[in-house]
Image (cartoon, rainbow, N blue to C red):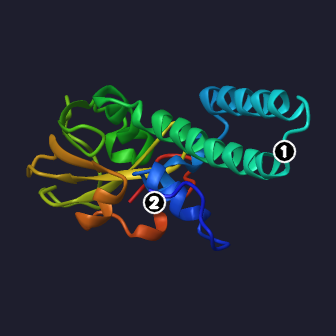
Amino acid sequence: MKLFASEPGNDLDLVRACNPISPRMVSTQVGSPEAQRLRSEIIRGYRTATSREPAPRLVRRARPMLLIGSALCLGVGAAVAATLAFNQDDVARYLPQGHSVFVGTSPVCETIRPMVEYRCTLSSRPVNPLVGGDYTNTVVQTVDDEKRINGGCRATSADGLAWTCFIGQEAVTEGILEESIVGAMQSGPAHG
């Protein structure tokens, strides 16, 4: 992998190489304490590096590029780490934050594929007057703690007690969400 592109605009290739997660999924993590700490360390390192004796001209030009490349990887890495730092308990919390059908149902989730797929069971039957008696294949979104739509779930039982949930791009692939709403703000549980 080339660290520095020779053509303008190829800096995004570096970010993509460092970041296996969709930018929408990590965009909410920019203000996280970990991302802010890493930002401070990068700025402190840059100030230290640039306050020394003048280096030869070639080194002076390369230093900012190296620091920018490092900052991109570290900043994106912090955001990725913050996004990846969720587990099945977090997913259980995302359900009622995403849709009112889960409010009061005390979901419990188990990991099928970490950070991608979860099987969730509700302690009580959901109540949604818009769904007839059979919940099978009903789909709803999930919302993270930053109030962003981060995935969705599909009911796998008629009584609505069993759901399979997918996070990020996988919810789009599974046909639960449109790609355009992944990462969109949602201030409270959806209804309907």
Q: How many marks?
A: 2
Q: What residue sits 55% from the left and 54% below the top?
A: 3
Q: How far across and how far down the image is residue 69, in percent?
A: 63, 49
Q: Earlier in the sequence, mark 2 or mark 1?
A: 1
Residue 41 visible, this angle: yes
Name the kind of residue labelled 2 in the image.
Val
Residue at the disc numbered 1 = 56
Q: Nearer the viewer, residue 190 or 88?
A: 88
Secondary structure found at label 2? loop
- Point out the image quarter for the N terminus: bottom left
Q: What residue sits 50% from the left and 58% below the top?
A: 2
Report the side of 191 relative to 170 (left or right).
right
Q: How far across and how far down the image is residue 152, in percent?
A: 32, 53
Report the side of 166 relative to 2 (left or right).
left
Residue 183 visible, this angle: no
Query: Is the Cβ of the residue at disc 2 closer than 8 Å to that at disc 1?
Result: no
Report the side of 64 relative to 53 (left or right).
left
Q: What residue sits 42% from the left and 51% below the top?
A: 21
Residue 7 vertical placement versus 115 (above, below): below
Q: What residue sits 52% from the left and 47% below the top?
A: 26
Residue at the disc numbered 2 = 182
Q: Nearer the viewer, residue 169 or 91?
A: 169
- Point out the image quarter for the C terminus: bottom left
Q: How far across and how far down the image is residue 129, in percent?
A: 29, 56
Q: Nearer the viewer, residue 14 or 122?
A: 14
Residue 112 vertical placement versus 15 (above, below): above
Count neighbours of disc 1 (C-alpha within 10 A) and say few if under 14, some if 14 to 19, many if 20 or more: few
